[in-house]
Image (cartoon, grey):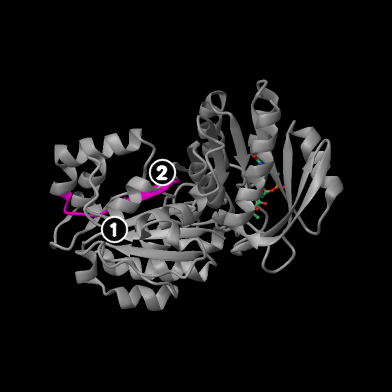
Amino acid sequence: MARLVLGVGGGIAAFKSAQLASLLRKRGHRVRVILTPAAARFVTPLTFESLTGEPVYHDLWNPPRYGDPDEALGEAHIHLSRWAEGALVAPATADLLGQLASGQARDGLTAFLLAFGGPVFLAPAMHHRMWLHPAVQEGVERLKRWGYRIFGPVKGPLASGEEGLGRMLEPAELADLFEDHLHGRDMEGKRVLVTAGPTQEPLDAVRHISNPSSGKMGYALAQAAFGRGAEVILVSGPTSLPDPYGVEVIRVRRAVEMYEEVARRFPEVDILVAAAAVADHRPKGMQAGKIRKEDLPFQVELEPNPDILKEMGLRKKPGQVLVGFAAEWGMDEASARRKLREKHLDLVVLNDVSRPGEGFEADTNRALLVAEEGKEELPLLSKRELAHRILDAVARRLSRG
Ligand code: PMT
């Protein structure tokens, strides 16, 4: 759990930052809030104090006392710059971005940001024409070059009643992204391809064979890899999940479509993580239109689908890392090891789909990581946390070369 500064700029999206502060605290982080004077007009310091249990810094000339032992060593913004492990500014207004891009420190927040050497994430929010102004765009490019990470804005309804690119990401998305990025940038420069979700194998225009995969495990992996600096492509079967921020998403339906999309991209990627629950077989010869109830066959003839992962295993080049999953009824390590060998994998994530709260659909999962040289047991974790533990194992392999 981290020590975080949440900076809040003076825009209407400031009200969402109260929810963000509360979420981050509920996830176990210590959150200290700095409000710009304009932000304090939108949401009072007392709101954030109550939500975080920490004093709020909102007046450069009248800083709060945090009660830390080393507090006397510097002004509040300097003290916080030593205390914090990461900072998130939400909303980052045009004015705030401009100040930061030109090195100004007119209030406690910009003073802190100039003094702070750790990772800073900016979540812009403003009217879409302000966002597109060259002064803002050039400032943002400069901030990116300096290592600031920008989340959003996204398209959507704006406070003005118009639609446009200017809306702040939602608090839960920001909290996830922020946590994913705090794991460090050990996948910078890497291209990661993730498969996720089920496939649907149609019998006719309205019926199909499928499975209960929700896509949560694969989407968590894609988001986590993006957070760690990778360029991520997600090939997803049908799910109800929104596209993860920062990830290129390719939506497919059938296993053969997933195979084509993966095969096309595989030569260019460093890491393939196959979390999709691909149907092993499909009905032979899809019928056009809807088969009438009276004509429905009692037996459906099936034919095999391509084994996407096995095919990629055969095409694997030196340096590429292949991670497969094994969805087993029980923790069947022998079966996972068979998949490891037969599909030429570096790592298999074995999960037990017979247990509630694990495997399909759940928000949590438990796994045994199986490699040629050993294994690692991962306890029941959120799928996001598990995704990071899987990527830790991948990163260790990459660093070994
Ligand atoms: O999506 P969720 O609801 O979050 O659920 C997560 C999950 C249970 C789907 C996930 O954790 C998981 O176990 N995914 C793999 C499911 C599966 O198909 O396992 P398998 O043991 O049948 O396949 C072994 C591996 O080969 C998998 O990596 C699979 O993606 C791949 N495969 C399988 C068949 C096929 N035709 N092509 C493949 O690429």
* Position of residue 184 measured from the top left corner of the image (x, y, whole percent): 54, 43
Residue at image mark 1 = 108
Marks 1 and 2 sit apart, C-alpha to C-alpha, by: 30 Å
User: Image check: 353 left or right of 284?
Assistant: right
* Position of residue 335 measured from the top left corner of the image (x, y, whole percent): 83, 46
Q: Nearer the viewer, residue 393 or 183?
A: 183
Task: Find numbered disc 1 in the image and state the secondary structure of the residue it sits on.
Answer: helix
Q: State the image quarter where residue 395 is shown.
A: top right
The residue shown at (73%, 39%) is: 347
Q: State the image quarter where residue 299 is shown.
A: bottom right
Single out the residue that lies furthest toward the top: 318
Observer able to see residue 39 = yes
Residue 112 lies in magenta, yes or no?
no
Task: Find numbered disc 2 in the image and state the secondary structure of the residue it sits on.
Answer: loop
Point out the image quarter for the C terminus: top right
Specify the amino acid type for callout 2.
Answer: Gly
Q: Is residue 178 above or below residue 42?
A: above
Single out the residue that lies furthest toward the right: 334
Q: Nearer the viewer, mark 1 or mark 2?
A: 1
Single out the residue that lies furthest toward the front: 72
Question: Closer to the N terminus: mark 1 or mark 2?
Answer: 1
* Position of residue 5 measured from the top left corner of the image (x, y, whole percent): 41, 59
CB within 8 Å, label 1 to label 2: no
The residue shown at (33%, 46%) is: 114
User: Image check: 31 left or right of 123?
Assistant: right
Q: Is residue 40 above or below residue 79?
A: below
Q: Which residues are magenta?
A: 118-128
Observer able to see residue 210 = no
Residue at image mark 2 = 246
* Position of residue 60 measured from the top left corner of the image (x, y, whole percent): 26, 61
Count neighbours of disc 2 (C-alpha within 10 A) and say few if under 14, some if 14 to 19, many if 20 or more: some
